[in-house]
């Protein structure tokens, strides 16, 4: 097996028949541990623009497309909007403690 290869099994090119490959694949799948299905999270990543802007960027948990949303006054409550691409509901929460931390950090940076 080549150094640095992180796999359960390695076949040298041309050193096996299709039947051997299929048999080995079945064996590896049968012996592999069953991993639990974690499901989709109900919260999606939220991106805050680096520059002063009146919007935030949310990512749809269904289609994974990002879109901008008006930056509403932070109420500390779960917000939601519809994805413009697929129509799925995007739920998001802006953590005001993180926003305050970012503001404080911005104030300490030298003006450019």
Image (cartoon, grey):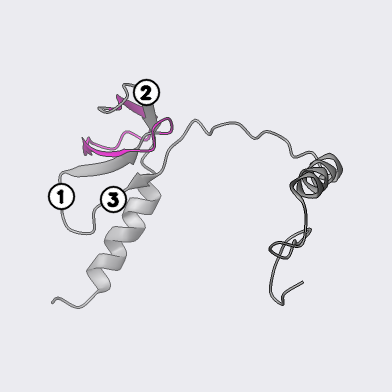
When the figure is inspected, residue 95 is found, relative to residue 88, above or below; the finding is below
SS of the residue under disc 2: strand
- Answer left or right for 75 relative to 112: right
User: Which labelled disc corresponds to residue 48?
Assistant: 3
Along the line of sight, the residue nearer the viewer: 111 or 17? 17
Which one is earlier in the sequence, the residue at label 1 or at label 2? 1
Q: Which residues are magenta?
A: 61-83
Q: Residue at x 77, y 43 (%)?
A: 22
Q: Residue at x 26, y 73 (%)?
A: 108
The residue positioned 46% from the left and 35% from the top of the image is 43
Q: Nearer the viewer, residue 54 or 83?
A: 83
User: In the rendered image, which residue does mark 1 sit on?
Assistant: 53
- Find residue 11 and report its image quarter: bottom right
Q: Does residue 19 sit above or below 76 in this rendering?
A: below
Q: CA distance from mark 1 to mark 2?
A: 23 Å
Residue 110 at what x, y percent from top left?
Answer: 20, 78
Numbered badge on residue 89: 2
Assign the C terminus to one quadrant of the image: bottom left
Task: Name the main secondary structure of what is drawn in magenta.
Answer: loop
Q: Nearer the viewer, residue 69 or 37?
A: 37
Question: Along the line of sight, which residue is nearer the eye, 51 or 33?
Answer: 33
């Amino acid at each position: 097996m080549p150094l640095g290869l992180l796999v359960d099994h390695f076949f040298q090119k041309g050193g096996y028949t299709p039947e051997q490959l299929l048999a080995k694949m079945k064996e590896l799948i049968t012996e592999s541990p069953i991993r639990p299905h974690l499901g989709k999270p109900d919260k999606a990543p939220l991106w805050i623009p680096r520059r002063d802007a009146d919007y935030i960027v949310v990512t749809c948990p269904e289609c994974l497309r990002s879109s901008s949303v008006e930056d509403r006054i932070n109420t500390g409550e779960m917000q939601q909007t519809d994805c413009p691409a697929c129509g799925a509901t995007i739920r998001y929460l802006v953590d005001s403690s993180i926003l305050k931390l970012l503001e404080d950090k911005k104030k300490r940076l030298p003006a450019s």
